[in-house]
Image (tube, grey):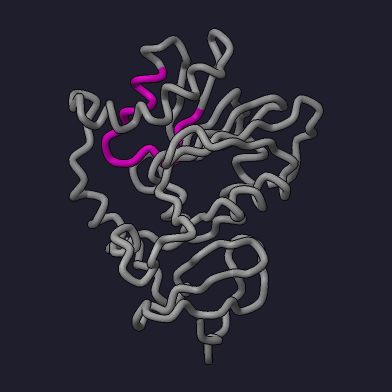
Amino acid sequence: MNRSSGDPAPCPLCGAADPPVIAGTGATGYRDCSACGLISMHPRHYPRPADEKAHYDTHENSPSDPRYRRFLNRLAAPMIERLKPGARGLDYGSGPGPTLSVMLREAGFPTRIYDPFYAPETDALTGTYDFITCTETAEHFHAPARDFQRVDRLLVPGGWFGMMTEFPSMDTDFGTWWYRRDPTHVCFYREETLSWIARRFGWRWERAGRTVAIFQKPEDARRGPD
């Protein structure tokens, strides 16, 4: 790794100063935070909102697509196993074709949606929820510290947070990794990053599949500030 030069920026998750650049990542210069393990794009390379939305508009996701449902079931199934009957939730980052919320409602769990581009109604962020899902969304967070703090505020004590994304492993060659090629993917979470997030908010967590992590907020947790 090379120490980043010029235009320093702290880690967007833990705030550590100017993480070093990962060699072989070209002009984008992804940074590797030794404090929390997050790999992140430098903010100067974040896509503009219009470009970001244009990229998302190319996605063809629909509740009527059985393949997409099978894909989302990687998170839906382990979440449903943990939920009490009638639990109420939020799909945070629902995208252009909300589907997971439909699947959860069909399973008996009323689920609202929020997405900064496609469902920006902020009243969805004013209540609290028994569970929150975040599928193929956390890698798009430009301000992950804010987003995870928001999730913590929105979860009731004892609530569940399910996150699905591709996690780089110890064997991942980040310079050639296919998942980073998406220009809207700006943050990548190692296992040590998931552990850091859990410690930060006092959550418990476990892996529930290759691409799925599930967190639980303690029963005795207090609601924190946004």
Residue 21 percent coordinates (x, y): 49, 79
Residue 63 shown in magenta? no
User: Which residue is painted at 59% across and 26% down in the image?
Assistant: 129
Point 67% across, 71% down: residue: 16
In the rendered structure, the answer to whether residue 111 lies left or right of residue 57 reads right
Q: Is residue 22 left or right of residue 84?
A: left
Q: For the view shown, which residue lies furthest in the bottom direction?
A: 6
Q: Which residues are magenta?
A: 90-104
Q: Nearer the viewer, residue 51 or 220?
A: 220
Pinpoint residue 116: horizontal percent, then vertical percent.
Answer: 42, 47
In the image, is residue 217 above or below residue 48? Answer: above
What residue do we see at 47% from left, 74% from top?
A: 42
193 relative position to 142: left or right: right
Residue 160 at what x, y percent from top left? 60, 28
Residue 26 figure quarter: bottom left
Q: Nearer the viewer, residue 167 or 86?
A: 167
Horizontal side of 129 relative to 165 (left or right) equals right
On the image, which quarter does residue 216 sit in? top right
Q: Which quadrant holds residue 33? A: bottom right
Viewer-proximal residue among 157 and 25: 25
**Residue 123 appears in the figure:** no
Is 102 part of what is drawn in magenta? yes
Q: Is residue 178 visible?
A: yes
Q: Residue 51, image x and y in percent?
A: 27, 63
| Total marks in image | 0
Q: What residue is at 45 percent from the left and 26 percent from the top? A: 112
